[in-house]
Image (tube, rainbow, N blue to C red):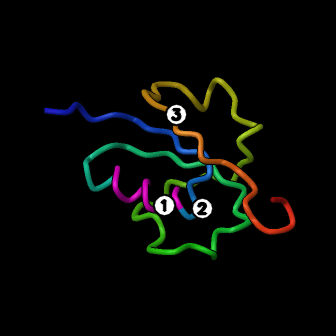
Amino acid sequence: MVSKMKVLITGAQGYLGTKLNNYLVCKGHQVIGFDTGVFKNCTLGDLPKENNILTLDANCIQSSHLKEVDVVIDLASNSNDPTS
């Protein structure tokens, strides 16, 4: 049996972040997401099931945000034509 974890996802409103967020929530994990929100309306699927997204740049994460977090999954990036 897999123990439930507290997971922090950066880039949680991006293409992969929204899918991963919903997958982990469905598996019973507690998820916190960080995202600047620049691409929040450009997803390929459903928005995250839980309103657990903080509008914050991943560069601004502080140690207080990591309290009791078991895993950090870093998906933050600028992935559009002008920045690629």
Viewer-nearest of discs 1 and 2: 2
Vertical arrangement, residue 29 with respect to residue 36, above or below: above
Vertical arrangement, residue 44 with respect to residue 64, above or below: below
Q: Secondary structure at mark 3?
A: strand
Question: Marks 1 and 3: CB-CB under 8 Å?
Answer: no
Per the rendered image, the range of residues in magenta is 16-24
Residue under label 2: 14
N-terminal-most mark, 1 or 2:
2
Q: Nearer the viewer, residue 24 or 68?
A: 24
What's the residue at 69%, 28% (across, down)?
A: 62
Which quadrant does the C terminus fall into? bottom right
Counting other residues with Cα less than 10 Å from the Cα at mark 1, is it few (<14), some (14-19), or many (20 or more)?
few
Counting other residues with Cα less than 10 Å from the Cα at mark 2, is it few (<14), some (14-19), or many (20 or more)?
many
Which quadrant does the N terminus fall into? top left
Residue under label 3: 72
Gap between marks 1 and 2, in whole Å? 15 Å
Residue at the right extreme, as displayed: 82
Viewer-nearest of discs 1 and 3: 3
Residue 38 percent across, percent down from the top left: 74, 65
Q: Secondary structure at mark 2?
A: loop
Q: Secondary structure at mark 1?
A: loop
Could you tell whether 13 is left or right of 6 in the image?
right
Amino acid type of disc 2? Gly
Q: Total number of numbered labels?
A: 3
**Residue 23, located in which quarter of the rendered image?**
bottom left
Residue at the left extreme, as displayed: 1
Residue 71 percent across, percent down from the top left: 45, 31
